[in-house]
Structure formats: structure tokens, C-alpha cells
Image: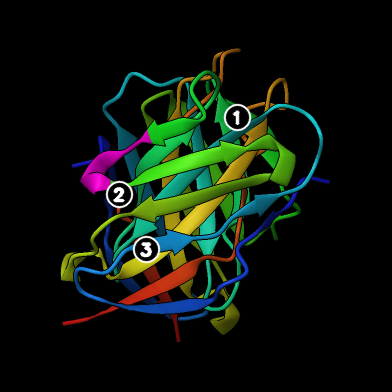
């Protein structure tokens, strides 16, 4: 069965510092990969996605992620974090032919930002 | 504004009550979903509707009853719930296509069962 691992439960960074949130997925087929962000009390907002093509994808709010097949990873990065980025971040994966409902989420990484 | 609207945003109900959560999507999608998000747990898929037909029921207790009258509206009817059912219930939608589907979420309905 497909699975997603976000090894960091909680990360704290200073405002202006760079950020990298880790995500690893299982399974060997071509994955569709997503990052979502959830602010307190809110739903999930799509940050970016990878289906095919360029392995470095750009998203909203200055985020980017890089798909590395050899490492089964899809890490999220931002060069300079803003206080408003404090939220919980979820990585998710589905696979070609699996159907849209076969979207598996990681447990999330909570990001705190120090002023 | 995500294009997926959920009401009510907050709901408190007793264990003997009957209530419903409503979801409406304005994106022209053909698939709709209910997810449950509890503290300390990953998101759990509950139900999937594709072209108004239920295609997935992830062993959800019968006290949760979904209804999808058309591809824009989705309901979750609740009755005789338990305190452990207290959670954030998220509605989502997507356009089912072979090239990959992106799921868009609503803001969620916070449910507290007392």
C-alpha cells in the first residue's frame, strides 16, 4: 500500500531563514505528488503539485518542491520564511490509474516561525 | 475562497441529535469527497462520489450517512454520534481525469459531540 512519511512533526525557524520540509513516499509507480498547507481552524490549501515534466515545481506563496525519484522524495522549500507561513504542511501522493480518491496524506509537519 | 463551501463552520450536537453538514462546489468538478481530520491522526477519507455515485466507503460507521443529490452538492447526515466523532470534517472536490487529479478542499466543519 502506498504511504507518505513526513519525518518532522514540528519545525521551528526564524523569520527570514530558509525552510525545507521533508516528504518521502513509498511504491514504485509514477507518483502524483502534492503539498497542502493548513492554517489553524482552516481547510487545506493546495501549495503545489507534480504530475510530470520538470522535477522542480513552483507553487504559491514562494514555495517550491523538487521530485527526486532516486530518493522517493518530494521536499518542500522556501528561501525566506515569513511569519504568516506558520501553519501545518501536508504532503500527499496518488498514482496514475489509482483513481483520484487514492490520495494518501502524511501526518503533517507543523511549522512555527520565530519573529 | 477555494470554490468549495461548507456549512455550518461549527456545530455542537448531543449524542441523540440528528444534524447535517452541507458542501457545495462551484468548480464544475465531477467528484466529491468527505474527509475526517482528528487531532494527532492523518486525514481519513470517508466517502467518495463520482458523477453522483458513491464509489468509496472506507468502513465508515452507519451513523454517518452521505448524500449526493447532484455533482455540485454533498451532504453528510449525522445521527447518534459519539464523542470520539468530534473532529474537523472536510469536503473536497476534483475533476476526475486520467492525467492526474487535484483535490480542492473546503474550509471544514468543526463538529463537537457532547
| Dots 3, 2 in contact, CB < 8 A | no
Please say whether residue A61 is one of the residues in the magenta stretch: yes
Q: Cα distance, mark 3 to mark 2?
A: 32 Å
Q: Label 3: which residue?
A: A19
What number of labels is visible?
A: 3
Side of A114 relative to B40 (left or right): left
Task: In this rendered view, identify the residue nearer to me: A43 or B18.
Answer: A43
**Residue A29 in the image: above or below residue B5:** above
Q: Relative to residue B86, is residue A46 depicted above or below?
A: above
Specify whether A80 is left or right of B72.
left
Q: Which residue is mark 1?
A: A100
Which residues make up the magenta segment?
A58-62
In the picture, the disc for residue B6 is: 2
State the residue at coordinates (43%, 77%). A11
* SS at mark 3 in the image: strand
- Quadrant housing the C terminus of chain A: bottom left
Front-lying residue, A103 or B78:
A103
Residue B95 is a magenta residue: no
**For residue B11, side relative to residue B112 (left or right):** left
Q: Quadrant of residue A30?
A: top right
Badge 3 and badge 2 both on one subunit: no
- Residue drawn at x 54%, y 24% as measured from the top left: A51
Amino acid at each position: 500500500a502506498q504511504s507518505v512519511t513526513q519525518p518532522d512533526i514540528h519545525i521551528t525557524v526564524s523569520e527570514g531563514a530558509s525552510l525545507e520540509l521533508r516528504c518521502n513516499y513509498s511504491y514504485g509507480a509514477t507518483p502524483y505528488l502534492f503539498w497542502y498547507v493548513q492554517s489553524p481552524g482552516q481547510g487545506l490549501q493546495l501549495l503545489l503539485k507534480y504530475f510530470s515534466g520538470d522535477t522542480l515545481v513552483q507553487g504559491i506563496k514562494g514555495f517550491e518542491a523538487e521530485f527526486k525519484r532516486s530518493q522517493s522524495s518530494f521536499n518542500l522549500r522556501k528561501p525566506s520564511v515569513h511569519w504568516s507561513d506558520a501553519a501545518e504542511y501536508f504532503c500527499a501522493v496518488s498514482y496514475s490509474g489509482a483513481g483520484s480518491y487514492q490520495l494518501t496524506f502524511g501526518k503533517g509537519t507543523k511549522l512555527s516561525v520565530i519573529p | 475562497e477555494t470554490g468549495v463551501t461548507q456549512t455550518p463552520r461549527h456545530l455542537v450536537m448531543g449524542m441523540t441529535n440528528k444534524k447535517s453538514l452541507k458542501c457545495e462546489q462551484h468548480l464544475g468538478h465531477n467528484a466529491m469527497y468527505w474527509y475526517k481530520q482528528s487531532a494527532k491522526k492523518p486525514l481519513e477519507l470517508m466517502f467518495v462520489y463520482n458523477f453522483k455515485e458513491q464509489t468509496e466507503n472506507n468502513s465508515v460507521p452507519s451513523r454517518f450517512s452521505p448524500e449526493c443529490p447532484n455533482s455540485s452538492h454533498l451532504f453528510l447526515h449525522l445521527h447518534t454520534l459519539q464523542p470520539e466523532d468530534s473532529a474537523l470534517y472536510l469536503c473536497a472536490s476534483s475533476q476526475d481525469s486520467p492525467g492526474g487529479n487535484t483535490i480542492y478542499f473546503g474550509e471544514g466543519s468543526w463538529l463537537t459531540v457532547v
